[in-house]
């Protein structure tokens, strides 16, 4: 039957039947992702009221999940980027020039090379919505630019060494780790704060949901500062020497540090020691990266190994061999791993869950790279190197569909102000940072021995109370006729005096001792043979 | 090579003119919405704090000349309440303007019960001076002024002994009085048309069932709750408890359930078909519970007690959701819910009828849909995280 002809009724029925049996694979994938964990087991609950409430809650949750699945399946406007090699081509052989030529004008405009060779290797940071890029050159050049529209927002030369830069909650503020202290700047380039508590800082990071600025430096002290109230929330001495590798886990807000001894430590503001200490490499840890879902961590060490770990189980997963020391690593929103060695950059696709056999893309840089970051919600990787800043296209790196209430690249000024207020109202407390954020609100069944002990204590207390009641009742009978008001009053008066007696006696004793001491002092001060007229000169 | 890269055109995501709507994109992937539970808990904490800040339930106090002994709600009007006091004075109050519309004079003893006929224009009141008076309640006027008129009773029913309670039938023009025994009266007869007795103890209150109009229940000083049917000659069932019940109220949405306010500081909710055990025991008062009334929604009820407080309970809640008390409020003898379930009235010994909000932190007046949605969201959050510190 030709394709254009409409199906006959009999065949239509058959095809519709077939459609019912075939499941859309995307539907199950989205459904699984939106499920957020297993449902409550209602069979084990005996309390009928609670059971009814939970059943209703589960029904509401399921209906909202179905609506969300529909929206996510059919209404999302964009799809992720792809790069496919045809025939005998391999993706890692493609050069950036070829990719840029094959792509439309809007995307081609995103690739640029800023040549700034005099002001030192550059570090960079993106805002959460990927709209603004912050450059920090080691010789003191700080600049914010709206990189997609090639518009410079501000530029300032601080004439000091800058070791790291990071945006705070939005593009209006950023922090720079300079020679001695950390400085906070406005988006006009004006210095707003000088954070003198943070000294000789090597790396900075910002936890957006908690409004915490973290720093680690030469002294190996990890400091958390709340940028909304200005207090130092915690400072932990790592006792592991100077450190310059620091990343935060976006899933649970835990800070991960890579040390020169080869161990990776994970810190929360509550605990004064590391929550987790893992020995990852036999040499110093060069670079660290965490994926946005908080499941995988990639570490690179001086022992030419790149290891992928399961962070939730703290188990090693894969090991890759690196032919040169790794300078920097980053993981994109969709799980692409970018590894930088000196002038060369390699991007691996699907290297975290499974062991990848070959890289996805390769790139050579005009200068020695310092740091790079994937731009959120864009298929772009921004690289800071000794000759300036470059951006390259990495198809499939960014999340194509953003949520306007989380991060909006096309945010207006009013929307930004509203979002700032909402974020401050929803600011999470630093002592809520734990390794497993699902613990909040979870009900834990009491262990059997604790329950048994509690029941024994209750029984003992009840019997004690009954015994006391019985004794009181008996005492009442004994006191029958002897509880006259006058007798009670007299006893009360006696008791009061009894209570005060020891205190009064002690005070009298103290007073006597003091007087005696004063008399003695007076006696010793005045010699015995001095005439009376002279005595006043000795007082 | 086949390449596809994310490239967004600005027109698709921004608006052209200020008169256009702003475009909102949603993506419900949990990867983009991190820290869901922590954020919800923070918002629940903020909602709880806001509730405490805005909890100002007391609205107005309406003065009487003697302790207020009973209250009655007009089924057809939402903005008025009728209160009877211990000196026989009955006042119809206009609550928004806090003024008396009518004073119904005539009783010489304490007014023990007032009840409205279903048409909302007639009410009957029973007093300890052994009379029941029938009044015509006019529609509330809108002119300014304190007391309009002293109105006289239209009809007077003379009884032999003091009356303790009264309730009007939901359909017909009959009413039941509680005193020595339960008497059924008709508007047009001067003698009771029917009498129910079971034992020789006083009956303290009667209430007609809202769904089954011929069924009613009474509480007596023999610690019993008795069920009657007008179509039968004798009472149906009697349930004796350990302590006496002071008042009774039927659930308007589940009319087979009723709640009894007991002397032992608790309220008991029973299913009238299964009087063997209570459905729920509501405990929170420290002294005898004097009166109980259900909200028109049938989901909660208000109770006033001898311990100078009134509490609002949820139907299935063992403990009260809210407690209202003031230094100046003495023993609460009568409580009523308003017709729109927004306000609660309490008549107490300190000669005042007080008007309170049913939800202490509720914003009254017309609210924007955005505000209503936020309030509903806050309530849902508080419900979900109510067990957490």
Image (cartoon, helix red, strand yellow):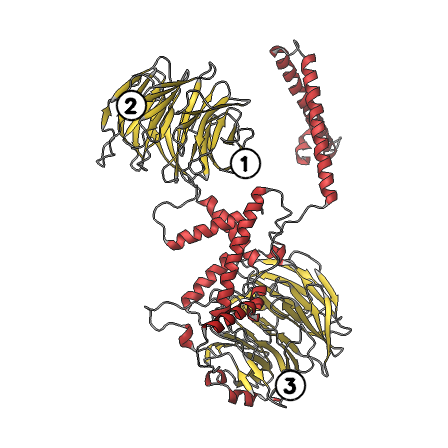
Task: Estimate the x, y position of residue A506 in percent, counting from the top left.
Answer: 71, 26
The tag on residue A456 is none
Tag 2 subunit: B
Q: Within 10 angstroms of label 2, few (less than 14), some, or many (20 or more) residues?
A: some
Quadrant assignment, res A217: bottom right
Determine whether A86 is above or below B265 in the image: below
Determine whether B298 is above or below B28 in the image: above
Nearest the viewer among A59 and A14 is A14
Quadrant assignment, res A386: bottom right
Q: Is residue A171 visible?
A: no
Q: Within 10 angstroms of label 1, few (less than 14), some, or many (20 or more) residues?
A: some
Marks 3 and 2 sit apart, C-alpha to C-alpha, by 103 Å
Marks 3 and 1 sit apart, C-alpha to C-alpha, by 71 Å
Determine whether A240 is above or below A133 in the image: above
Task: Estimate the x, y position of residue A248 in percent, counting from the top left.
Answer: 62, 66
Tell me the residue at 54%/34% (across/down): B280
Q: Which residue is mark 2?
A: B187
Q: Is residue B344 visible?
A: yes
Q: Which residue is mark 1?
A: B318
Tell me the residue at 38%/31% (across/down): B213
Q: Secondary structure at mark 1?
A: loop
Q: Secondary structure at mark 2?
A: loop
The tag on residue A343 is 3
Marks 1 and 2 sit apart, C-alpha to C-alpha, by 41 Å
Mark 3 in CB contact with mark 1 (< 8 angstroms): no
Direction right: furthest residue: A282
């Amino acid at each position: 039957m030709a394709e254009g002809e409409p199906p006959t009724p009999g065949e239509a029925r058959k095809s519709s039947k077939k459609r019912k049996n075939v499941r859309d694979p995307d539907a199950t994938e989205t459904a699984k992702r939106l499920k957020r964990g297993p449902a409550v087991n209602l069979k084990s609950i005996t309390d009928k009221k609670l059971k009814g409430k939970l059943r209703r809650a589960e029904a509401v949750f399921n209906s909202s999940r179905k609506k969300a699945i529909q929206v996510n399946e059919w209404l999302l406007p964009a799809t992720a980027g792809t790069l496919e090699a045809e025939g005998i081509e391999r993706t890692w052989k493609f050069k950036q020039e070829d990719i840029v030529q094959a792509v439309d004008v809007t995307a081609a405009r995103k690739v640029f090379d800023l040549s700034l060779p005099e002001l030192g290797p550059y570090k960079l940071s993106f805002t959460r919505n990927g709209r603004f890029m912050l450059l920090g050159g080691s010789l003191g050049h700080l600049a914010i630019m709206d990189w997609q529209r090639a518009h410079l927002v501000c530029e300032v030369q601080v004439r000091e060494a800058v070791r790291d830069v990071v945006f705070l909650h939005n593009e209006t503020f950023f922090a720079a780790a300079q020679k001695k202290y950390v400085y906070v700047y406005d988006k006009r380039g004006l210095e707003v704060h000088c954070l003198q508590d943070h000294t000789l800082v090597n790396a900075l990071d910002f936890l957006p949901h908690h409004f915490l600025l973290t720093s680690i430096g030469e002294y190996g002290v990890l400091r958390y500062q709340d940028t909304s109230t200005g207090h130092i929330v915690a400072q932990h001495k790592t006792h592991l020497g100077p450190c310059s590798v620091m990343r935060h886990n976006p899933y649970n807000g835990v800070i991960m540090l890579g040390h020169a001894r080869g161990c990776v430590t994970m810190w929360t503001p509550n605990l004064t020691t590391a929550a987790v200490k893992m020995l990852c490499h036999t040499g110093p840890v060069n670079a660290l990266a965490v994926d946005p879902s908080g499941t995988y961590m990639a570490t690179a060490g001086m022992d030419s190994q790149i290891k992928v770990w399961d962070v939730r189980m703290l188990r090693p997963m894969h090991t890759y061999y690196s032919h040169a020391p790794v300078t920097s690593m980053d993981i994109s929103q969709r799980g692409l791993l970018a590894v930088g060695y000196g002038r060369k950059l390699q991007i691996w696709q699907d290297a975290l869950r499974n062991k990848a056999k070959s890289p996805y893309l390769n790139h050579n840089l005009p200068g020695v790279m310092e740091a790079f970051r994937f731009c959120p919600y864009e298929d772009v990787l921004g690289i800071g190197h000794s000759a300036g800043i470059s951006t390259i296209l990495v198809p499939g790196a960014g999340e194509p569909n953003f949520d306007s209430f989380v991060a909006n690249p096309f945010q207006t000024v009013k929307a930004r102000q509203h979002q700032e207020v909402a974020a401050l109202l929803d600011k999470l407390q630093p002592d809520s940072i734990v390794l497993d954020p699902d613990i909040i609100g979870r009900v834990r069944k009491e262990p059997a021995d604790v329950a048994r002990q509690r029941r024994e204590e209750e029984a003992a207390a009840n019997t004690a109370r009954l015994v006391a009641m019985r004794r009181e009742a008996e005492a009442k009978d004994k006191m029958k006729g002897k509880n006259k008001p006058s007798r009670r009053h007299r006893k009360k008066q006696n008791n009061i005096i009894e209570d005060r007696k020891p205190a009064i006696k002690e005070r009298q004793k103290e007073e006597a001792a003091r007087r005696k001491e004063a008399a003695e002092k007076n006696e010793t001060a005045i010699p015995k043979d001095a005439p009376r007229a002279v005595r006043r000169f000795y007082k | 090579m086949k390449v596809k890269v994310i490239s967004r055109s600005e027109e698709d995501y921004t608006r052209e003119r200020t008169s256009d709507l702003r475009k909102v994109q949603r993506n419900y992937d949990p990867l983009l919405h991190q820290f869901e539970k922590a954020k919800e808990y923070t918002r629940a904490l903020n909602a709880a704090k806001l509730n405490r800040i805005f909890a100002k339930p007391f609205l107005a106090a309406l003065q009487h000349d003697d302790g207020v002994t009973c209250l009655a709600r007009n089924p057809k009007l939402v903005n008025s309440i009728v209160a009877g006091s211990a000196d026989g004075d009955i006042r119809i109050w206009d609550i928004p303007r806090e003024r008396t519309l009518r004073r119904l004079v005539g009783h010489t003893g304490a007014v023990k019960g007032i009840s409205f006929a279903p048409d909302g224009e007639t009410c009957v009141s029973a007093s300890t001076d052994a009379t029941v008076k029938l009044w015509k309640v006019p529609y509330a006027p809108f002119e300014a002024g304190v007391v309009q008129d002293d109105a006289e009773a239209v009809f007077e029913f003379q009884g032999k002994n003091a009356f303790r309670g009264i309730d009007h039938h939901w359909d017909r023009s009959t009413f039941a009085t509680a005193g020595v025994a339960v008497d059924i009266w008709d508007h047009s007869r001067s003698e009771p048309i029917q009498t129910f007795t079971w034992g020789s103890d006083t009956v303290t209150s009667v209430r007609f069932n809202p769904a089954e109009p011929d069924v009613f229940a009474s509480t007596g000083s023999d610690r019993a709750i008795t069920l009657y049917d007008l179509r039968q000659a004798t009472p149906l069932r009697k349930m004796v408890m350990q302590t006496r019940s002071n008042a009774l109220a039927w659930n308007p949405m589940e009319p087979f359930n009723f709640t009894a306010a007991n002397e032992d500081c608790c309220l008991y909710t029973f299913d009238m078909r299964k009087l063997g055990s209570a459905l729920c025991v509501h405990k929170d008062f420290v002294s005898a519970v004097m009166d109980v009334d259900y909200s028109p929604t049938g989901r909660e009820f208000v109770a006033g007690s001898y311990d100078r407080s009134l509490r609002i309970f949820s139907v299935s809640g063992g403990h009260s959701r809210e407690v209202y008390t003031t230094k100046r409020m003495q023993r609460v003898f009568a409580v009523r819910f308003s017709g729109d379930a927004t306000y609660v009235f309490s008549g107490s010994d300190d000669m005042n009828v007080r008007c309170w909000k049913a939800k202490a932190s509720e914003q009254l007046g017309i609210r924007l849909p955005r505000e209503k949605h936020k309030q509903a969201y806050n309530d849902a959050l508080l419900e979900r995280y109510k067990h957490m510190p």
